Image (cartoon, rainbow, N blue to C red):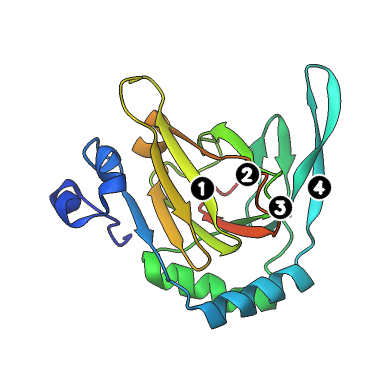
Amino acid sequence: MEKPIETNKDVEKMDSRLKPMLERGCRVKLEERWLVPKECFKWEKRILQNADLKAETGKLMGKTYVAKRKTCYYGTASYSYAGTRREPQAWPDWILPLKSMVEDSCGCTFNFLLINHYPDGNAGLGYHSDDEKDLDPNSTIASLSLGCSRDFYFKHKTDKKLDVVKMELHAGTLFTMDANVTQKNWKHCIPVRKGKTTGRLNLTFRTMKER
């Protein structure tokens, strides 16, 4: 059984930025300094040296484009996104200690890892939900940030009166959210920030349905 992230009873104790989401049944938690700076530098260096990061291509309005961010996938279960099935590489030994740390913190196990590398502030990610059909809807999604701090926004899909939920993800921050209520009702994004000249790594641990 998964370790609870947050319940509505914890709203008053929680960061006020997340209160609108918690009040509406989301299970979200923001842990700043989950990794201390020394560990952040160690893992950022290890990932950049070892991860098979590549820029993906896609089609938009009939035109082929190359994404500004680079990605790679590890795990034992694949998933489809934007009409393309992503087949992960096997878990490399060098990432397993970090995977175990995140699993211990969340109280669950993950079978898939997406690594995104944003080389600078010109690379971002538009509003979307992590609601792929291959994702276990009863699972937790854990997102670890390394490198440059970046803004992270949530907006409700239907209630336009709600303000955008804004936070800044610093190196070492672990953000967790449920794969059910949050994904059904909210979208999130990483806005472009042209003033940012250094890179950011984001590691998203997920539990996908085994095929």
When asked about the image quadrant of residue 82, the answer is top right
Q: Which residue is mark 1?
A: 151
Q: Residue sitting at 24 percent across and 35 percent down?
A: 24
N-terminal of the pair, mark 4 or mark 3, is 4
Q: Amino acid at mark 3?
A: Asp
In 3D space, how far apart are the residues under numbered discs 2 and 3 (Cα atoms)? Answer: 8 Å
Q: Amino acid at mark 4?
A: Ala
Using the image, tell me which numbered label, if any, was put on residue 120: 3
Does 211 appear above or below 131?
A: below
N-terminal of the pair, mark 4 or mark 2, is 4
In 3D space, how far apart are the residues under numbered discs 4 and 2 (Cα atoms)? Answer: 19 Å
N-terminal of the pair, mark 2 or mark 3, is 3
Q: Amino acid at mark 1?
A: Asp
Does 106 appear above or below 209?
A: below
N-terminal of the pair, mark 1 or mark 2, is 1
Q: Which residue is mark 4?
A: 55
Q: Of helix, strand and loop, which one carries label 3?
A: loop
Q: Is residue 146 left or right of residue 55?
A: left
